[in-house]
Amino acid sequence: MSLQLKNGIEQLEESAVAAQLREGFRTLRFEKSLEKAFLAEHLADTRPFIKLNLIVAVGLIAAFAVMDRMLLPEATQRVPDLLRFLVMMPLLGLLIGVTFTEKFTRWYPILVQAIAPVAGVCVVLIETRAAQNGVHLVFATLIITVIYVHFLIGMPFYAAFRSNLLILASYVVASAMMPGLHGANIAYSVLVLVLASSVCALVAYNLEMANRMNFLEARLLGEMAARDGLTGIYNRRMFDERIEQLWHQAIRERVPIAMLLVDIDFFKPFNDRYGHQAGDETLMAVAATLSHFARRPLDLTARYGGEEFAIVLYDVDKAFVTDIARRARAQIEALGIGHESSTAAQWLTVSIGAGVVLPASGRSREGLIQLADEALYAAKAQGRNRVVVMEKEYADLRTGAFHSEKGA
């Protein structure tokens, strides 16, 4: 294998998911785009669970209010009732309401990270007032709160850990400021709370680690199903799905879309002369080269079939597409892959046909594909190893009117 060919193959970029799996994530953080996707997907998956747990939390607040009335004098209930029914329940009600909205994944993480520590401090104040009146059973509510924050309301690990640290700190301060509380009891309660928080944090860390690993593995399997097994770029099935999505998005946003069809010149004679192993290596090198011309989020490169590749470019004009096509053709020729069976050049070359259209509701993506196909036919007819870009010709096309023979 030539050095140029080897370098071309090695330039095929590793996916963000594969890179994240290789690098690891002991800090429970992915790179920016993956982190956003993970949090949104995890919240969407756990929404019914979160909703149920928030409703149960409201019931627990009411149940503890009834229990306090059984254990404590009525005169001591004013402040706890204000905290329960004017602070905690309205805040939990807000969270429950958000779980029913379409903006759940956007607003819930912000609200829960603000509300959870506030609710935790309210529980601390209620518990310390009960302890001041000789009732220490209410301390169990703090343990329940720690469990809720870590596991039951959809908070990521670090947000939950910070909230529980605040709850612990507020308990220490409130206990120290409350007259009548025995120092030994406070120390014992703090120790129990620290141990409970530590155990919850350890389990929560491992649980989120497992959730993140499952997310990456599922994404990787999806990528493998969407990618061509030889070249590593998108396969035809994924191309069909993505171009359909991009076509409709371009209609909504009223922006042009382009498709480039890239065909390796005289590839069958190349295989016959140099062997299928060399042919496979060449396909990989060409794919790696082409992938560098579709770097933006909505662009894509795919293996369209055999020795034919497709590049889709979103929101571009004819001049941009022409420049991309010419540079792609030149870089593939610059790989320096010898092709003595070619009549186009002494090196392996490609012909590129491109179509640029402004999608409209009266036409379909098949028209764009046909335009690129017609342009590719023209490039081959003109002698191969060249670029043809069509734009205005789109108005005269009739979907399905393909040339019967387009050459090898």
Image: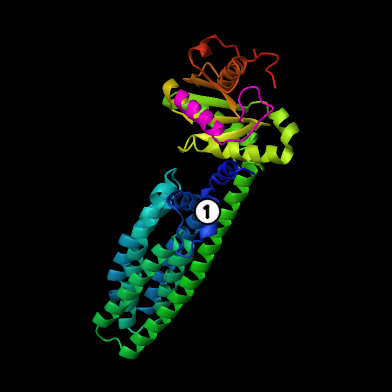
Figure check: 11 above or below 359: below
The image quarter in which residue 280 lies = top right
Please tell me which residue is depicted at 54% across the width and 37% down the height of the picture: 289
Range shown magenta: 322-347
Residue found 48% across the figure and 29% down from its top: 327
Q: What residue would you read off at disc 1?
A: 19
Q: Quadrant of the C terminus?
A: top right
| Residue 380 appearing in the image | yes
Figure quadrant of residue 184: bottom left
Q: Residue at x 24, y 80 (%)?
A: 177
The residue at the point 42 percent across, 44 percent down is 103
Name the residue furthest top: 396
Tell me if 108 is positioned left or right of 225 in this view: left
- Tell me if residue 73 can be seen: no
Circle 1: residue type: Ala
In this rendered view, identify the residue nearer to me: 353 or 72.
Answer: 353
